[in-house]
C-alpha cells in the first residue's frame, strides 16, 4: 500500500493509478495496453484504478467515442474503481466538467506570479518558430509577452485582443525525476519555453489539467505512452508551483507494426473494437498485450488476478514492442479451447444457422472448437453440418467407391436405426467390410462431410439434423 498522500488538504489512504484517454477515436491497442498496465499495477499493489476522460478538446471529443472506450474497457475486464458511472468526492471524472476546479488553480498560479497573458497571434508565433529553426535552434516561445508592463497589458486587453495564459518557466533550473521505465531523467528549464496552460477560449490545456487532475485525484503512479516523456518536466513545474504532489511516471514504449511504423489502421485492425468484432476473446487480447513490452516468467493463459500478481514495472522494456497477430492468435487458440459448450455457442453466434436447436448447436460448437481460431473459421463446418450434403472431389469419390456399396448400405441401415450415431454406423460398416482404422473411418468421413480431414466426427454427426447421416451415406450404397 502506498504512503499517505496529502493533496489539497485531502488525505488518501491508498495510492492510485489511472488511465486518461482522450475520446477522439476508437480505443487503440496501444491505449488498451496502457489501460491494462495501469489496471494491473493498481491491482498488484491494492491501489485504486481511476478512469478519467480527457475531453477538453470539444471539437474532437465525441460522445460515441466515450461510450466506445467505456464498453471496450468493460469488455476487457478492466473495471475502474472511480470514473464515469463511479463518481465519488474526487470527481467529476470528465475534464469537461472540471472547469471550476481549474479556475481555482489558475487563480492560485496567477497570485503566485507563475502565469502571464500572451497576446501573440498564431502568425507571430509561427514566424518566431521559423526564425529559430532557420538559425538551427529548437523552436520555443521567445518570451515576447513575458515582461509586458501592466499598462501594456491593459492596452491590449482594452483593444479586445484574445490572450492565452502562459506558465512562466523559472530560469536556470534542473528538473530531475526517476522514470519507472527509463530510470533517472534530467531536463534543463532553460530548454523549455513558457508554455500555454489556458487557451484563448478559456479552456485548460493538456499539460495543466492532466497534471492537476492526477494530483487532485490522488494518483500516485502513472504509466503512459513514451510520447509524453518530454511533457513530464513541464507538468512537474506546474505541480511544484501549485504545491501539489507529483505522481511517479513511467513511459512505456510504443507498439509498432510489422514494418516498424507505429501500429495504425494501415496495418489492418488496430482498435479493440475491431478485434472484438472479429471474434477475438478478451482474455486472449489481455494476455497478449500483457506480454507486449512486458517480460514475464508466467507462460500460461492467466486471469486478470494472475496477471496482476505477475505484473512488475521492472519488467517493462524500453525497446519498442512489435505487434504480431500470429502471437495473438496463439493466445486466442488457447482461450477458445477453454470455452465451455455454452460459451462456445454464444461465441460462434450467427455462424450457427438460426433454426438449429440448442443441444445441436452446443454439440456442433464443442466439435469444431479445436479446429477454429475465429468464429469465421467455423463457417465452412456449419455449412457442411447444417447445409446440403457436400459433394466430393474426384479423389474422395474414388476412395468412397473403393469402399464399396455393401459398406455404405450397412452404414446407412445403421444410421436409419440409430440416428446420427457414429459408433453404430462404424460398427455396421466394419461388420460388413472387415475394414478398420483409417480404412474404415476415412470413407465414412468423406461421405458424411465431403472432406478427408476435420474436427472429431462423432460430435459433428451428432449435431446434424435427424436422418441426415442416413441421407448422405445412402448416396453411395
Ligand atoms: N489524454 C492523454 C492521451 O490520451 C493522456 C496522457 C497521459 O496518460 O498522461 O494521450
Ligand atoms: Zn506572447
Image (cartoon, rainbow, N blue to C red):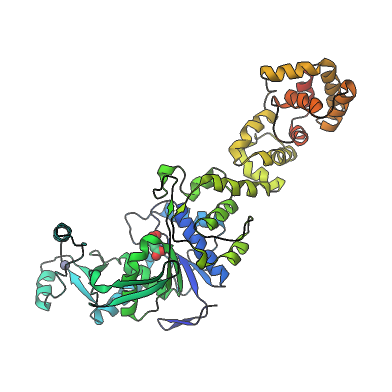
The x and y percentages for residue 280 are 57, 46
Residue sitting at the far bottom: 9
Q: Can residue 111 be seen in this view?
A: yes
The x and y percentages for residue 98 are 37, 69
Q: Which of 348 and 281 is in front in this view?
A: 281
Image position of 223 with respect to 334: above or below: below
Image position of 117 with respect to 345: above or below: below
The x and y percentages for residue 207 are 32, 67
Q: In which quarter of the image is the C terminus?
A: top right
The x and y percentages for residue 92 are 43, 69
Q: Nearer the viewer, residue 7 or 2?
A: 2
| 225 relative position to 230: left or right | right
Query: Residue 108 sits in which quadrant?
Result: bottom left
Residue sitting at the far right: 431
| 335 relative position to 72: left or right | right
Q: Nearer the viewer, residue 198 or 372?
A: 372
Image position of 412 with respect to 187: above or below: above
Query: Residue 413 sits in which quadrant?
Result: top right
Residue under the image location 54 percent in, 65 percent down: 40
Q: Quadrant of the N terminus?
A: bottom right
| 77 relative position to 369: left or right | left
Query: Residue 238 sits in which quadrant?
Result: bottom left
Amino acid at each position: 500500500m502506498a504512503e499517505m498522500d496529502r493533496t489539497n488538504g485531502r488525505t488518501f489512504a491508498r495510492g492510485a493509478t489511472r488511465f486518461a484517454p482522450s475520446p477522439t477515436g476508437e480505443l487503440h491497442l496501444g491505449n488498451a495496453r496502457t489501460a491494462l498496465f495501469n489496471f494491473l499495477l493498481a491491482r498488484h499493489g491494492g491501489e485504486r484504478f481511476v478512469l478519467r476522460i480527457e475531453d477538453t478538446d470539444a471539437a474532437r471529443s465525441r460522445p460515441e467515442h466515450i461510450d466506445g472506450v467505456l464498453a471496450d474497457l468493460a469488455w476487457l475486464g478492466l473495471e475502474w474503481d472511480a470514473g464515469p458511472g463511479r463518481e465519488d468526492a474526487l470527481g467529476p471524472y470528465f475534464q469537461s466538467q472540471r472547469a471550476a476546479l481549474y479556475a481555482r488553480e489558475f487563480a492560485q498560479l496567477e497570485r503566485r506570479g507563475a502565469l502571464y497573458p500572451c497576446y501573440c497571434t498564431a502568425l507571430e508565433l509561427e514566424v518566431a518558430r521559423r526564425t529559430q529553426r532557420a538559425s538551427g535552434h529548437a523552436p520555443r516561445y521567445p518570451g515576447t509577452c513575458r515582461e509586458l508592463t501592466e499598462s501594456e497589458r491593459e492596452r491590449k486587453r482594452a483593444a479586445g485582443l484574445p490572450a492565452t495564459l502562459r506558465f512562466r518557466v523559472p530560469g536556470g533550473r534542473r528538473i530531475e525525476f526517476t522514470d519507472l521505465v527509463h530510470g533517472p531523467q534530467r531536463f534543463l528549464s532553460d530548454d523549455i519555453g513558457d508554455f500555454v496552460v489556458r487557451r484563448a477560449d478559456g479552456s485548460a490545456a493538456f499539460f495543466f489539467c492532466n497534471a492537476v487532475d492526477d494530483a487532485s485525484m490522488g494518483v500516485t503512479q502513472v504509466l503512459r505512452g513514451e510520447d509524453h516523456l518530454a511533457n513530464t518536466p513541464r507538468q512537474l513545474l506546474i505541480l511544484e508551483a501549485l504545491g501539489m504532489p507529483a505522481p511517479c511516471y513511467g513511459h512505456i514504449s510504443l507498439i509498432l507494426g510489422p514494418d516498424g511504423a507505429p501500429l495504425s489502421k494501415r496495418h489492418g485492425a488496430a482498435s479493440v473494437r475491431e478485434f472484438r468484432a472479429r471474434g477475438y476473446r478478451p482474455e486472449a487480447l489481455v494476455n497478449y498485450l500483457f506480454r507486449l513490452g512486458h517480460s514475464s516468467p508466467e507462460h500460461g493463459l492467466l486471469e486478470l488476478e494472475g496477471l496482476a500478481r505477475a505484473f512488475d514495472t521492472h519488467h517493462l522494456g524500453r525497446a519498442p514492442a512489435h505487434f504480431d497477430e500470429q502471437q495473438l492468435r496463439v493466445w486466442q487458440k488457447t482461450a477458445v479451447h477453454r470455452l465451455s459448450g455454452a460459451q462456445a455457442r454464444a461465441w460462434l453466434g450467427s455462424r450457427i444457422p438460426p433454426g438449429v436447436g440448442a443441444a445441436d448447436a452446443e454439440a456442433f460448437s464443442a466439435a469444431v472448437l479445436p479446429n477454429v481460431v475465429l468464429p469465421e473459421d467455423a463457417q465452412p463446418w456449419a455449412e457442411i453440418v447444417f447445409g446440403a450434403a457436400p459433394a466430393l472431389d474426384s479423389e474422395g469419390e474414388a476412395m468412397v467407391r473403393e469402399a464399396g456399396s455393401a459398406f455404405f448400405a450397412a452404414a446407412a441401415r445403421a444410421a436409419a436405426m440409430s440416428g446420427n450415431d457414429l459408433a453404430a454406423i462404424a460398427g455396421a460398416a466394419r461388420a460388413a467390410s472387415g475394414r478398420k482404422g483409417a480404412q474404415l473411418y476415412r470413407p465414412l468421413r468423406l461421405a458424411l462431410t465431403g472432406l478427408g480431414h476435420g474436427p472429431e466426427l462423432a460430435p459433428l454427426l451428432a449435431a446434424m439434423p435427424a436422418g441426415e447421416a442416413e441421407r448422405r451415406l445412402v448416396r453411395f450404397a
